[in-house]
Image (cartoon, grey):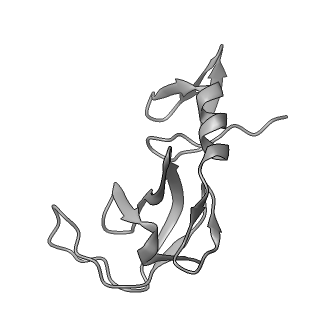
Amino acid sequence: MTTLPSCPQCGMTNTYEDGAQLVCADCGYEWSATADAGAETAVDVRDSNGNRLQEGDTVVVIKDLKVKGSSIPLKQGTTIKNIRLIADDPEHIEGHSDKIKGLVLKTCFLRKA
């Protein structure tokens, strides 16, 4: 049995194939299965220490960061679980902290946990 990728929109693993598309059962997002496979192999994302990052990794913030649109800063040592890579952008990742959802962070402020 092949393992299907997590949903690029919500990060949940409850996905299924529908023809040539992949569908998330939780949020209803649909994306192309062929585009997803090509996007993951094309991007080489590295953290501040030079370690390679992959979809679903856990990273730690190495510096206090101000978050646009939020009065809560992202403190040093905050963990970001189940990250998602951004296609064609090796300097940014998407993820969620415990208090702030929908973060886009620069990899120079992160280290792999």
Q: Examine the rendered structure and indicate whether residue 38 appears above or below residue 78.
A: above
Q: Residue furthest top?
A: 19
Looking at the image, residue 100 lies above or below residue 5 = below
Whether residue 5 sits left or right of residue 79 in the image: it is right
Residue 18 in the figure: left or right of residue 3:
left
Q: Is residue 9 above or below residue 74?
A: above
Q: Quadrant of residue 46?
A: bottom right
Question: Percent x, y for residue 30?
Answer: 49, 25
Tally of numbered discs: 0
Most distant residue in the right direction = 1
In the foreground, 21 or 107: 107
Q: Where, quadrant-wise, is the N terminus in this rendering?
A: top right
Q: Position of residue 103 (x, y in %)?
A: 34, 59
Q: Left or right: 90 with respect to 13?
A: left
User: Which quarter of the rendered picture does the C terminus lie within?
Assistant: bottom right
Name the residue located 44 percent from the left edge and 74 percent from the top edge. Answer: 108
Residue that appears at 59% across and 39% down: 39
In the displayed structure, 69 sits above or below 24; it is below
Q: Quadrant of residue 38?
A: top right
Task: Tell me which residue sits at (57%, 69%) in the image.
Answer: 58
Q: Residue at x 48, y 35 (%)?
A: 26
Q: Say whether residue 31 is left or right of residue 5.
A: left
Q: Position of residue 102 (x, y in %)?
A: 34, 54
Residue 67, position as x, y percentages in the image: 23, 69
